[in-house]
Structure formats: structure tokens, C-alpha cells
Amino acid sequence: MSWFVRKDKGIQTPTEMKREAPDGLWYLCPNCKKVMNTREHKLNAYTCVHCNYHEKIGSDAYFSILFDENEFTELDANMQSADPLKFVDTKAYPDRLKATMAKTGLKDAVRTAYGPMNGLTVTMAVMDFNFIGGSMGSVVGEKIARAIDHAIEHKTPFLMVSKSGGARMMEAGFSLMQMAKTSAKLALLEKAKLPYVSLLTDPTTGGVTASYAMLGDFNIAEPEALIGFAGPRVIRETIGKDLPKGFQSAEFVLDHGFLDFIVDRKDLKDKLVSLFKMLL
């Protein structure tokens, strides 16, 4: 016999009395399609508790994961791009910037800050893909350069978290110049004998991969991150051949010698501190 029997038949609840689950209470994994509590997902460093899928996250989330008690001091927080080329595509570049700022609450595609990481003061730059595809413009290059200057001045390790579609076409040559500028600053960091770890996340492509993202004392990545210069479609159309399975995934890049190792986001903080202490 069933342990529960409904005594009254035909019970109906009026629509106005029904309660809906609050928005944002549940997270649906795009990889395994399983549902979990949003709070559980956040406490698991924004990774799926079922399949370990690493959700794409931005600077806010990385700061909360890496800095002790989410305590940090942001650098150059209000720096914004100008419009040196008077660029117009479907809309004027300044209008695109204003719309993106309003939508994302960000000033540009990178945020820089310093603070404690397991008690060790670290300077870091974290890119946000939501801001025009994480594209590298003059502000991105300048903020990274200034963050490196801060690391040199205060003798802290430097962490770069890359997530980008490449150079920002609206700034053309000004964007490409950031590759050389950031690389030169990293040479000064090396000269000062300070450690630099580059974390490549999904996706890291274009001029970012061709410059600061691959210049770390350790180049590490999150699982299954897309890493490359040109995209798979462009390469396939250029060479006229099908690409190997998993081409440009972090695992593929690791197997071919372009990464030092892959680290799970839940272990990232402890691993980074170990690397920095080993290099200091």
C-alpha cells in the first residue's frame, strides 16, 4: 500500500496561488544538461558537480576565487578607450563602447588589481570576454602594462588570466601595437626576476595568444579551453583539410608542448601560490 494517499479528489490550485521557483535558483550545465543549485555551482568554483564543465566566467568571479576573502585593490578602474580612427561599422565605435559599458558594467575588456592570495600579495590582470569579445585594444594593453609596472615597483608576482577573441579591429594598428608593448613590459618583469604565470581560459585566440598569453614562466590552462591563433574554421578553409579531433583544445595544445599543465579551477589558487613561491 502506498505511504501517501490523496483523500480529496480533484484538488485545483488557482493560478494566483501557485508559487514559481525564483529566477537564478538553478543552474543548467550546457555540457551534460544536468541541473544543480546555483549556490552549489558557485561554491564549486563555477564548475559542474556532475561533469566538471568549467563555465565561462569573468573578472568578478576570478577575483572572488583567487583573492583572500575577495579583498583587493583595483588599478586604473576608470580607464576608457578613445576613438583614434573615428571607426564606424554598424555603429560608431564610441556608441558601441557606451552600449557595451551599459550592458556589462565594465569599462573595458580587462581589469587589473592586487591583493592577498593565501597571504601572498599578487598583482593580476583578468580579461572579460563579455566586453566586445575580450578584444585587445589600447586600454587593454595599457592596463596590463601598468599592472606589470605595479608588480615591478612593489616586487609582487604577476598573473595574467586571458580570455579573448584577439585584437580589436576598431583600433586597427593601435591594437596590434599592444602586443609589442605588453611583451616589452614582461621582459622588464623578467629582468626584475619576478615570476609571471599566464592562465589561458576559454577562448584565448588571436593576437593575445601571439603575445603575452604565451610568455609566462609557466603557461597553464583550464580544462578544454580553446587556445589558438586563427580559428578552426579559418584554418580548415585555408589548408583544405579536416582538422584533428580536439584541435586547439587545451589538452591538444598540452600534448604538443605549448602548455606546461592543465589545472582544475577548484585547485587554481593553491597551485598558483605554489608556483609563485617556487619562483620567488
Image: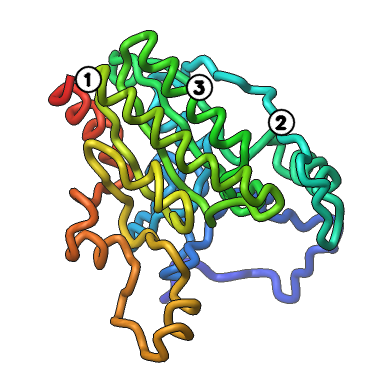
Report the amino acid beneath label 1: Lys
Which residue carries the number 1 mark? 193
Q: Is residue 52 above or below residue 79?
A: below
Q: Are marks 2 and 1 in contact (CB under 8 Å)?
A: no
Q: Position of residue 261 (x, y in %)?
A: 19, 50
Foreground: 157 or 184? Answer: 184
- Alpha carbon of mark 3 to alpha carbon of mark 2: how far? 14 Å
Q: Would you place residue 178 above or below residue 91 in this image?
A: above
- Density class for disc 3 (Cα within 10 Å; few <14, some 14-19, many ≥20) is some
Residue at 35% in and 30% down: 186
Whole-percent x, y for residue 208 in the image? 46, 49
Which amino acid type is shown beneath numbered disc 2? Answer: Gln
Q: Which residue is mark 3?
A: 146
Considering only order in the chain, which callout, 1 or 2, is on the residue closer to the N terminus?
2
Pointer 2: what residue? 80
Report which quarter residue 280 is drawn in.
top left
Secondary structure beneath disc 3?
A: helix
Report helix, strand or loop for mark 2. Answer: loop
**Number of dots carrying numbers:** 3
What residue is drawn where x is 32% and y is 23%? Answer: 189
Distance in Å between CA atoms under marks 1 and 3 = 17 Å
